Structures are given as C-alpha cells and as structure tokens.
Image (spheres, helix red, strand yellow):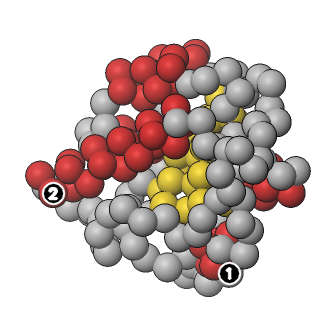
C-alpha cells in the first residue's frame, strides 16, 4: 500500500526522542483525531518523522491529508476501500484490510524509520472485531523505547488504558450535529 508522501531515510535524520510514550485519545466527544494531528504537527515541526495510519477511513479524501502532504517528514497511509464499513457488518474483505493495516502499523512502529506513529481509529477497529486487543497490546509491549505511539478511537478497553502513559477521554457536552448542522470540510473532515 503506497503512502501519500515520502520521508527522509534514517541515516539522513537521526532519531531524536530518548523515551517515547503511548497515548490514547478516546471517548464519545469530538477531537480524538484532531488531538493526534496536533501532536503530529508539533512533532514534524521539531523535525521528527511521523507516520499517520488511518483505520476505517478508507480512501476518502480528508482535508488533513492535503496539508500533511506538504510536510516531507510526515507519511500518511490510508489503506482500505472507499466507504469502508459504513454501518454494515464487517466482511472477510474488511477483516483482511484491517489486518493489512495492522501489519503496516507494526512495520511503522517497529521498523526504526519513524519517531511518532499514529494509529487513527484503531480503537474503533478493535471494538468492531477487526483487530484483536492482544495484537494491540503486543504492539505496545514491543514498541521501541524512542517511538511515540498514539492510538485514537472510541471505546478504549481498560486493559489498553492501563498500558498507556497518557489517556485523554473526550466528552461531548454539546455538538452542532444535534441541531442539524452537517460535517463541514476543513473543520470536521
């Protein structure tokens, strides 16, 4: 699966983090992916190499992907199909896509090329049964010390919360969707 942009090789850009942590952004409120993107932007601004891997978002065009293409130290991978899941039960093809995305996540986190790896919506993939909790726990356990690993999505299980160093739960207080205001390009996607 080709990534949207390329990064410098590890020889050209030495790793700069001494101790990477595990973050979880979860909860029913808006802002989980946005928080992860903010961290990715901050890391890129410091010269760190970032790989943002989207679970469940298929190949749809999201505005952040356009902006991140401008940053040579950020790689964005959006495996999957257009319209991935959208309210239906996962098929065998969906399971294969999720496993391929998980393989890519392992490669990014363990391969030594990236300082920060974001697994966007991996927790939703977990709740839908597309990936296994033990596989995510294993990735956290095997993560090299200098890699910062960020997991996003609703419904983080307590076992993963306990493994993480930082957990933020987004809580919805008020949302414009409930007043009939639809998602807006550039603000919500």
Q: Is residue 41 visible?
A: yes
Residue 115 in percent (x, y) is at 69, 40
Residue at the left extreme?
92
Mark 2 or 1, nearer chain start: 2
Q: Is residue 159 above or below residue 180?
A: above
State left or right for residue 61 relative to residue 149: left
Which residue is disc 1 drawn over? 186
Residue at the front extreme?
11
Q: Which mark is residue 93?
A: 2
Binning the other alpha carbons within 10 Å of mark 1 as few (below 14), some (14 to 19) or many (20 upward) gives few
Q: Residue at point 53% right, 70% down?
A: 4
Q: Which element is circle 1 on?
A: loop
Q: Residue at point 32% right, 74% down?
A: 82
Quadrant of image for the C terminus: bottom right
Residue 100 in percent (x, y) is at 30, 49
* Pointers 2 and 1 in contact (C-beta within 8 Å): no
Binning the other alpha carbons within 10 Å of mark 2 as few (below 14), some (14 to 19) or many (20 upward) gives few
Q: Which element is circle 2 on?
A: helix
Residue 170 in percent (x, y) is at 66, 45
Q: Residue at point 83% right, 52% down?
A: 47
Looking at the image, which is closer to me, 85 or 44? 44
State left or right for residue 60 relative to residue 14: left
Looking at the image, which is closer to me, 181 or 110? 110
């Amino acid at each position: 699966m080709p990534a949207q942009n390329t990064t410098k090789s590890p020889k050209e850009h030495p790793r700069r983090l001494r101790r990477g942590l595990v973050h979880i952004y979860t909860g029913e409120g808006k802002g989980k992916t946005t928080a992860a993107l903010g961290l990715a932007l901050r890391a890129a601004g410091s010269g760190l190499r970032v790989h943002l891997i989207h679970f469940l978002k298929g190949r749809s065009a999201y505005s952040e992907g356009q902006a991140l293409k401008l940053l040579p130290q950020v790689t964005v991978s959006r495996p999957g199909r257009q319209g991935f899941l959208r309210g239906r039960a996962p098929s065998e093809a969906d399971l294969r896509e999720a496993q391929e995305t998980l393989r890519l996540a392992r490669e990014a986190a363990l391969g030594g090329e990236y300082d920060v790896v974001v697994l966007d919506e991996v927790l939703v993939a977990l709740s839908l049964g597309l990936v296994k909790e033990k596989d995510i726990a294993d990735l956290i356990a095997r993560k090299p010390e200098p890699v910062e690993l960020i997991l996003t999505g609703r419904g983080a299980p307590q076992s993963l919360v306990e493994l993480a160093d930082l957990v933020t739960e987004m809580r919805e207080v008020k949302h414009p969707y409930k007043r009939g205001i639809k998602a807006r390009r550039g603000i919500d996607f």
